């Protein structure tokens, strides 16, 4: 048994170059992989996983209102867990579930179940893979480390102070410190935050990836407070959620309805808030202008964030310098999602309207390739409403309403299209296979048998 375990771990490490090891591929959440997908093989559906029920999102629906624009029903700002997202490596695919409260491991070629690991609450992000191990968090307040090939638990850690539970928005019992930021593994350390509501202070943690300890050099469990973010607020206004970003020196935590926050990676101490400089009354309200849980780091470690759409008239993405968090270096009007490929950025741009009930409704989308330096358009294609995109080799893969399709990076020409059930809001690719996750709880696999 020991020999088998050693061989399995070696295979997992060896195949890491052609893997999708964490949510959106890396801790910058770039959605970019240099692996390749063969267009001729994408027409072959390998398997479909169908969840017993649609994902139970942590914060279903939109906020009750946007006073700035007098909108009674603005779009959801905390839309980070709409599907069962996938990570994959060494012939195996993994996903967390907010329905079964588990992490599932399946054969990437056949979809056959290898094992599942049950927790005490919903698992909202896929596990992160590193050195033959998986790392993931749950609404039960624990971060887990398990063997990637067998699912056997290695260690678990809880940042919370008590074992009290309450009924969450999704109907599940949840601790006051669920882990909803994903779990990032980098340089033998594990990073995450645990939080539920802003009036109960959150924790930011850096753990030893091998043993799960929080004591040692650059290891910590600290209260993730943000002094001065909201004047007159006595507690911490933060409730981190959405995938954590990791740069060489900083950690970035999304907040949903207020602007993202920056922390020192070595100490966990708060550094700044991402928000444009403003004077007078709007200086306190600018915490709302960068809202949303969508974010990524550019190759220069600039931060692209937005899509919160509160106190704004669209889903603009703003790009901030990492070392100048009050300086917007680029603004992408109506942009919903982005991937960066060297000098180019591929962007989903959504158009919207308001229906008779005042609901925000996205009506159609464009995928555009932009020159990052000049902002000029290289190519574009218009289609129905879209939600996500990734770059895999020489292809841009896009998910939308009941479909997924692939475009050539060079000229935007469509080379593959497939209908799916539901909104395709999650994409991943590894070892010649594409995984499409939808908001009805399905995962589709296409590509290399």
Image (spheres, helix red, strand yellow):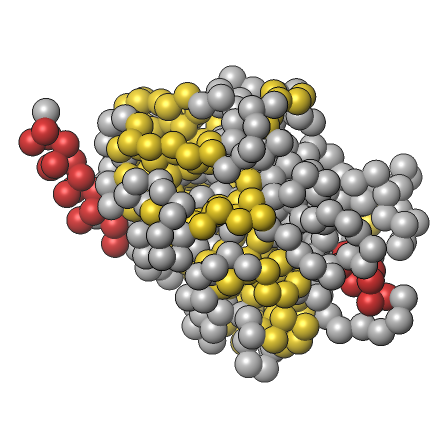
Q: Nearer the viewer, residue 66 or 244?
A: 244
Q: Report the number of discs.
A: 0
Is 300 located above or below residue 257 in the figure? below
Specify the quadrant that holds the N terminus: top left
| Residue 192 seen in the current view | yes
Q: Residue furthest bottom?
A: 374
Is 373 located above or below residue 30 in the figure? below
The image shows residue 82 at horizontal and vertical percentages of 59, 36
Residue drawn at the location 17% of the way across and 49% of the way down? 14
The image shows residue 310 at horizontal and vertical percentages of 79, 53
Residue drawn at the location 51% of the way across and 56% of the way down? 268
Q: Quadrant of residue 423?
A: top right
Q: Residue furthest left?
A: 3
The image shows residue 32 at horizontal and vertical percentages of 41, 58
The image shows residue 80 at horizontal and vertical percentages of 59, 42
Specify the quadrant that holds the C terminus: top left
67 on left or right of 129: right
Q: Residue furthest front?
A: 215
78 on left or right of 267: right
| Residue 21 seen in the current view | no
Q: Nearer the viewer, residue 364 or 93?
A: 93
Residue drawn at the location 70% of the way across and 66% of the way down? 275
Is 415 located above or below residue 63 in the figure? below
60 on left or right of 187: right
Residue drawn at the location 81% of the way across and 45% of the way down? 74
177 on left or right of 365: left
């Amino acid at each position: 048994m020991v020999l088998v375990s050693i061989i399995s771990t070696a295979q997992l490490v060896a195949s890491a170059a052609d893997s999708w090891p964490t949510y959106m591929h890396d801790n910058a959440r770039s959605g970019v992989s240099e692996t390749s997908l063969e267009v001729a093989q994408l027409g072959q559906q390998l398997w479909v996983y169908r969840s017993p029920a649609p994902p139970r999102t942590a914060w279903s629906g939109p906020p009750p209102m946007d006073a700035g624009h007098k909108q009674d029903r603005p779009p959801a700002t905390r839309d980070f867990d709409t599907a069962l997202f996938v990570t994959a490596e060494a012939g195996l695919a993994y996903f967390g579930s907010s329905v079964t409260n588990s992490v599932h491991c399946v054969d990437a070629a056949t979809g056959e179940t290898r094992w599942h690991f049950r927790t005490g609450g919903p698992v909202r992000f896929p596990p992160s893979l590193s050195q033959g191990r998986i790392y993931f968090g749950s609404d039960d307040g624990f971060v887990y480390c398990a063997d990637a090939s067998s699912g056997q638990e290695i260690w678990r850690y809880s940042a919370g102070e008590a074992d009290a539970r309450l009924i969450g928005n999704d109907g599940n019992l949840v601790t006051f410190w669920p882990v909803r930021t994903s779990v990032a593994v980098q340089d033998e350390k594990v990073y995450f935050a645990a939080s539920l509501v802003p009036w109960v202070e959150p924790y930011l943690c850096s753990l030893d990836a091998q043993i799960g300890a929080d004591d040692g050099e650059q290891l910590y469990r600290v209260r993730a407070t943000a002094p001065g973010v909201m004047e007159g607020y006595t507690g911490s206004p933060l409730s981190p959620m959405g995938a954590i970003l990791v740069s060489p020196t900083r950690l970035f935590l999304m907040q949903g309805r207020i602007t993202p926050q920056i922390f020192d990676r070595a100490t966990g101490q708060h550094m700044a808030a991402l928000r444009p400089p403003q004077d007078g009354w709007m200086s306190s309200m600018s915490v709302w202008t960068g809202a949303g849980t969508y974010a990524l780091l550019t190759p220069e470690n600039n931060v692209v964030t937005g899509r919160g759409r509160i106190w704004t008239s669209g889903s603009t993405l703003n790009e901030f310098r990492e070392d100048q968090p009050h300086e917007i270096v680029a603004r992408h009007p109506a942009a919903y999602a982005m991937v960066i490929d060297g000098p180019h950025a591929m962007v989903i741009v959504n158009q919207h309207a308001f229906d008779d009930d005042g609901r925000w409704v996205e009506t159609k989308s464009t995928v555009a390739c932009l020159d990052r330096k000049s902002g000029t358009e290289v190519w574009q294609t218009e289609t129905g409403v879209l939600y996500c995109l990734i770059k895999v080799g020489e292809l841009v893969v896009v998910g939308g309403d009941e479909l997924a399709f692939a475009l050539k990076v060079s000229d935007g020409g469509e080379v593959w299209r497939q209908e799916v059930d539901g909104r395709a809001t999650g994409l991943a690719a590894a070892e010649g296979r594409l995984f499409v996750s939808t908001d009805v709880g399905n995962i589709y696999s296409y590509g290399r048998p």
